[in-house]
Image (cartoon, rainbow, N blue to C red):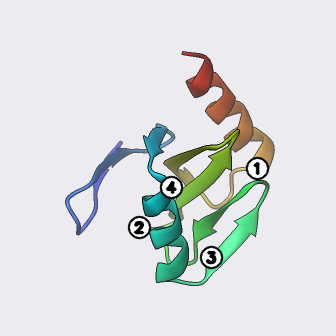
Amino acid sequence: MEYISPYGYSYKIEEWKEISEEEYWEMFEILPPIFFGSGFFMLEALTGIFHNYYIKWKGRYYTAIFSRNDTWEKIKESLESFIKE
C-alpha cells in the first residue's frame, strides 16, 4: 500500500528508506515523539493506525511506515533485512 504525505513524500507500508541525520532530527522536533527501541514514531498517525517510524541504527538514519500495533522485534527484523539487501 502506498501513502503520499502532504509534503509530497511517497511511502510504502513497511518499506524502509535511508534519510539524513537532519531529516531525522527535524521529524523528532515536529511533534512529541513516542520512543521505542533505538528510535521513535510520530505521535500523530498518518492514517488510521499507521505511523512514521524513525530509527538511528549503526550511525545511519532510516524511516518507514508501520502499524502502531507492530512489535519492536518485527520492526527491527524488517530493518535488518533491508540493510542486508
Quarter of the rendering containing residue 80: top right
**Which mark lies nearer to you, 4 or 2?**
4
Task: Please identify, in this view, whether the residue under mark 4 or under mark 1 is nearer the observer.
Answer: 4
Q: Residues within 10 Å of mark 4 (few under 14, many from 20)?
A: few
Q: Is residue 68 above or below residue 59?
A: below
Label 4 residue SS: helix
* Circle on res. 21: 4
The residue at 63%/34% (across/down) is: 79
Disc on the earlier residue, 2 or 1? 2
- Please, what is the three-letter code of the amino acid marked with disc 4? Glu
- Considering depth in this image, is 33 or 29 the residue closer to the camera? 29
Mark-to-mark CA distance, 4 and 2? 25 Å
Residue pointed to by mark 2: 47
Residue at which label 1 appears? 71
The structure residue drawn at horizontal position 55% and vertical position 51%, both measured from the top left corner, is 66
Residue ID at (52%, 80%): 29
Q: Nearer the viewer, residue 71 or 9?
A: 9
Screen quadrant of the N terminus: top left
Give the amino acid at mark 3: Pro
